[in-house]
Each structure stands twice: as structure tokens, then as C-alpha cells.
Image (cartoon, rainbow, N blue to C red):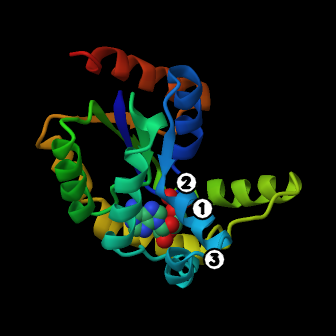
Amino acid sequence: MRVILLGPPGAGKGTQAQRLVEHHGIPQLSTGDMLREAVANRTEIGLKAQAVMDAGQLVSDEIVIGIVADRIDRDDARKGFILDGFPRTVAQAAALDTMLAERSLRIDAVLEFQVDEGRLVERIEKRARETAEAGLPVRKDDTPEVFKRRLGEFRQLTAAVSPFYRAKGLLREIDGMASVEAVTAQIESVLGERVGA
Ligand code: AMP
């Protein structure tokens, strides 16, 4: 099963991706996590991406397309994967199409998390607070100021990804404001209909 989670930052994609990993035994491919790891390891990609990420802007299509292409070829992704935070531009979506076609693979469903944008800042603040309380490092871009920039990038560039998948008949809307359990239930119901259809 190959699924894309689409939605603004703070919509709950990461939380649901982890649940899908547990239920379906396929990996979560989060470009944000991969880029943060590259930054932490001070790789060439990490050094290029760091300032852009800290400012809440999008890293270049070329960089993220490259890391996803490498990642989907790893053994653990053979049976499927959950893409979280990719594609974020139409160019990334088109590149993903080509990448999958070259491997005779296809996406089963694109889940679009619908959220009340006014409440996302609250969610981000909560995430930063809980992370700090757990003694873990807080993301530099989880501040209200940078978050607004990230939301701006979403509206300007990522919102156009939904029509791309709607035109292919793959887009399914999920109410992202429901409880974590209820969102998971919606997702499982949609996947039950789609996969193998
Ligand atoms: P995330 O963890 O998905 O919120 O991503 C954190 C940051 O990583 C974003 O604000 C971007 O700077 C960068 N990033 C993650 N995924 C992508 C992507 N698909 N395209 C461009 N930049 C990305």
C-alpha cells in the first residue's frame, strides 16, 4: 500500500503516519524527518537545507526529490510506504509520478487532512510545549512566527497538489479536527475501500 498524507503543518499527519506504520507494517517516509536528520549529521544536504528550514520555507524540489527517490528503493519500502510531507509542490508530485511509473508502482490513496487553520497555531504551541516537557529538543520552526511562514508556503505552493491528485481520482478528504482515534478510524475506512480496488 502506498499512501500520501497531505495537509498543512500541524494537521496531524505525523501522528497518523505513526499509527499507520503500526497497523500496516510499512514505513513512514517523512521528508521533514529526513531533512532534520541530514541537518543533525551535517551532511551536504543538511548544510544546504538548514537555513531554509529554520526560516519556514521549502527546501528545493531537486533536493527533496533526490532523497525520496533514494528512500523508496530501500528494502523496507518494497511493500509500501506512507509519504508524510511529500509532495509539497506540483513539481514534486509530477516527479513522484515519474519515479513510481519507472518502477511500475502506483499510489493507492492521497489523504487530505482538512483543518481549521485558526487552530493550527495552538496545536504547534502544544507540540512544542509537550516536546520540551518530555526533555526532547524542540523544533526550531515550531514557533508561532516561523509557523505562519510555513502556513504561507503551504497556501502558496502545496495547496495546488490537491487538485493534481483530485484529477487522478485519488484524493480523499479526512476531517483532521476530529480526535486522534476518530481520524485514524476515518483513514482506515478510506483505505479499506481504496486498497485493492
Ligand atoms: P515537516 O516536518 O514536514 O513540517 O517539514 C519541516 C521543513 O522541512 C519544512 O518547513 C521544509 O523546510 C522542509 N521540507 C520537508 N518536506 C519538504 C518538501 N517535500 N519540500 C520542500 N521542503 C520540505
Provide residue 158's location: percent of width, then percent of height: 32, 61
Q: Which residue is mark 3?
A: 42
Q: Is mark 1 within 8 Å of ligand 1?
A: no
Name the residue located 22 percent from the left edge and 44 percent from the top edge. Answer: 100
Q: Nearer the viewer, residue 82 or 11?
A: 82
Number of the label disc, if any, that sits on residue 43: none
Regarding residue 163, the answer to whether it shows in the image is no
Q: Kindly indicate the quadrant of the structure image that contains residue 67.
A: bottom left
Asked whether the beta carbons under mark 2 and mark 1 sit within 8 Å of each other, the answer is yes
Q: Nearer the viewer, residue 35 or 162?
A: 35
Mark closer to the chain start, 2 or 1 = 2
Label 2 to label 1: alpha-carbon separation: 8 Å
Quarter of the image for the N terminus: give it. top left
Q: Which residue is mark 2?
A: 10
Quarter of the image for the C terminus: give it. top left
Q: Is residue 117 left or right of residue 50?
A: left
Q: Is mark 3 within 8 Å of ligand 1?
A: no
Q: Is residue 23 left or right of residue 164?
A: right
Provide residue 190's location: percent of width, then percent of height: 35, 22
Q: Amino acid at mark 1?
A: Val
Number of residues whose C-alpha sits closer than 10 Å to that of mark 1, classed few (under 14), some (14–19) or many (20 or more): some
Helix, strand, or loop for circle 1?
helix
Mark closer to the chain start, 3 or 1 = 3
Helix, strand, or loop for circle 2?
loop
Name the residue located 43 percent from the left edge and 37 percent from the top edge. Answer: 77
Q: Nearer the viewer, residue 37 or 174?
A: 37
Provide residue 21's location: percent of width, then percent of height: 55, 30
Number of the label disc, if any, that sits on residue 121: 1
